[in-house]
Image: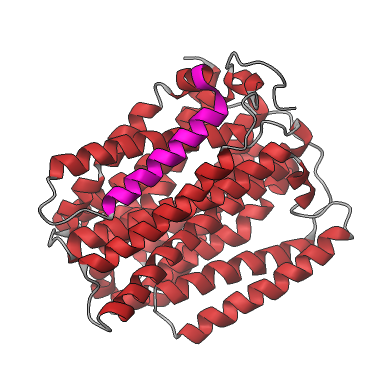
């Protein structure tokens, strides 16, 4: 197997473990809470602590890769994730479980950005699309297969195995990295920007924690608003710090590159919609359609089929159509798939839902593959680390805010229409119309991408400037 295929597959082993774990836990909260003697709503703090760890430590991943070597950091990140997983399985109180999830998040925060950075640095630009296609499979398939797997493990075995199963997977990943992935040339590390690390970490943690508290009410709303306010203050302080620092932790000057800027900003609107649907759609199937958690998970699983199929044709499609057409169509079809969920009713045929989910999953997968490569279209190797970290931070924040957007619209519709009780089908429909419209904003923005952008990556036989 060639390096362009072997490298992303080995990296993807760890990312699948991380991505599936993040979603599996959601289906098992009730069982875990009952075991450790707390309420499911309080246990949602464990979801929040994981996201907060990601927000704090993703910004430092590029510096660590340059300082200690990408292979070493990736290997240690997997080991930290394994230790955190064992700690989760052994937890017997709310505090120990929340802290264990934070430890897991520290490992996860380094795995994804470092894996992407490794691929960007070792893969020729004209082979980057194919490599990223394989690397992005875990991020697509993990959240879709997570709920049914989590439901099955919790129902037929024990919730502890959700975490213990990571041990053999993680050890296999470490052994594969040791055996097949050499250490690569790395940039000379910058001086560590400790002030920037504190301000950026506080900003992102404040935003993620604040949004999580407001959408998963395990704590009073005042905590959420206070955290958001703190995040805004430290964001302003970071911007002032960045302007007078030679080597800031997050170098916002990469936004001067137009294709990078377009990919990040337009991608935020796409991910706001995509981030909301895994939360809203299963909830609608359970509350409004009366399906069990396991049955709803089996319905949403159809999206994984389309997502996986796209990996085998993504490189060919991008070569035939180029980045602009791929990004426009993938965002448009994804938005249409969300609009379709706004007209589903309990008598909607399940096979029809399956078909729409497969098609939407295919185009959503095309978006992830295309943007994972296109974000580096006009970025030089020396700026790849900064571009990678900033794009990863934008991914995590926009997905978290997507859940907040979906939950917020659902709650507003519920209060406006019937004032209390569980949300009704009409409330879910309203939420899907809104997040579908938000997703469409990305389509409009990507229509402004030059037809010739990124030709040196996609291999599309267009004319004119290649996006430099």
Answer whether residue 389 is magenta in the image.
Answer: no
Rendered view: 93 above or below 157: below
Quadrant of the snapshot with the C terminus: top right
Q: Looking at the image, which residue is at 53% across and 54% down?
A: 396
Residue in the foreground of this view, choosing between 38 and 381: 381
Residue 184 position within the rendered picture, expressed as x and y whole percent measured from the top left: 68, 28
Q: Looking at the image, which residue is at 19% across and 66% down?
A: 287
Residue 304 position within the rendered picture, expressed as x and y whole percent measured from the top left: 31, 38
Which image quarter: residue 89? bottom left
Rendered view: 114 above or below 147: above
Q: Looking at the image, which residue is at 24% across and 70% down?
A: 30
Q: Main secondary structure of the magenta part?
A: helix
> What is the basis of the colouring in this image?
secondary structure
Rendered view: 156 above or below 213: above
Answer whether residue 328 is magenta in the image.
Answer: yes
| Outermost residue to the left | 347
Residue in the foreground of this view, choosing between 197 and 306: 306
Residue in the foreground of this view, choosing between 187 and 76: 187
Q: Is residue 97 visible?
A: no
37 lies left or right of 206: left
Residue 182 position within the rendered picture, expressed as x and y whole percent measured from the top left: 62, 26
289 lies left or right of 192: left
Residue 432 position within the rendered picture, expressed as x and y whole percent measured from the top left: 34, 58
Q: Is residue 430 visible?
A: yes
Which image quarter: residue 163? bottom left
Q: What residue range appears in magenta?
A: 320-341
11 lies left or right of 205: left
* Number of numbered labels in the structure image: 0
266 lies left or right of 170: right
């Amino acid at each position: 197997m060639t390096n362009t295929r072997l490298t992303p597959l080995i990296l993807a082993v760890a990312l699948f473990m991380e991505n599936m774990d993040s979603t599996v836990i959601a289906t098992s909260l009730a069982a875990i809470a009952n075991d450790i003697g707390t309420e499911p709503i309080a246990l949602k703090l464990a979801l929040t602590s994981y996201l907060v760890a990601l927000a704090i430590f993703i910004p430092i991943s590029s510096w660590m890769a340059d300082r200690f070597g990408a292979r070493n950091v990736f290997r240690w990140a997997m080991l930290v994730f394994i230790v955190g997983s064992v700690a989760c399985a052994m937890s017997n109180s709310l505090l120990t479980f929340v802290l264990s999830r934070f430890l897991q998040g520290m490992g996860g925060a380094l795995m994804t950005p470092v894996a992407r950075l490794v691929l960007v640095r070792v893969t020729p630009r004209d082979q980057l699309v194919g490599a990223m296609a394989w690397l992005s499979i875990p991020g697509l398939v993990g959240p879709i297969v997570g709920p049914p797997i989590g439901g099955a493990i919790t129902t037929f075995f024990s919730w502890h195995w959700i975490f213990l199963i990571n041990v053999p997977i993680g050890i296999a990943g470490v052994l594969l990295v040791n055996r097949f992935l050499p250490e690569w040339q790395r940039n000379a590390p910058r001086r560590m920007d400790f002030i920037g690390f504190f301000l950026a970490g506080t900003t992102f943690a404040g935003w993620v924690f604040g949004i999580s508290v407001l959408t998963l009410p395990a704590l009073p709303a005042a905590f959420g608003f206070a955290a958001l306010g703190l995040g805004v203050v430290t964001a302003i302080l970071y911007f002032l710090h960045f302007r007078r620092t030679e080597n800031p932790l997050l170098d916002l000057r990469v936004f001067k590159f137009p294709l990078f800027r377009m990919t990040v900003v337009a991608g935020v609107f796409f991910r706001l919609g995509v981030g909301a649907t895994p939360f809203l759609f299963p909830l609608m199937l359970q509350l409004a359609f009366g399906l069990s958690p396991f049955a709803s998970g089996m319905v949403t699983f159809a999206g994984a089929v389309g997502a996986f199929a796209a990996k085998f044709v993504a490189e060919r499609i991008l070569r035939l159509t180029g980045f602009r057409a791929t990004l426009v169509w993938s965002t448009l079809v994804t938005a249409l798939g969300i609009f379709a969920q706004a007209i589903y009713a309990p008598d909607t045929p399940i096979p029809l839902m399956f078909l729409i989910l497969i098609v939407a999953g295919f185009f959503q997968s095309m978006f992830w593959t295309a943007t994972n490569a296109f974000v580096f279209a006009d970025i030089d190797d020396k700026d790849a680390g900064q571009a990678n970290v900033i794009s990863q931070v934008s991914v995590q924040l926009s997905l978290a805010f997507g859940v907040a957007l979906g939950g917020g619209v659902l709650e507003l519709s519920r209060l406006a229409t019937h004032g209390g009780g569980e949300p009704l089908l009409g409330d879910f429909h309203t939420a899907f119309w809104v997040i579908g419209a938000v997703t469409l904003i990305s389509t409009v923005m990507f229509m402004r991408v030059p037809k010739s952008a990124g030709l040196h990556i996609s291999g599309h036989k267009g004319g004119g400037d290649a996006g430099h």
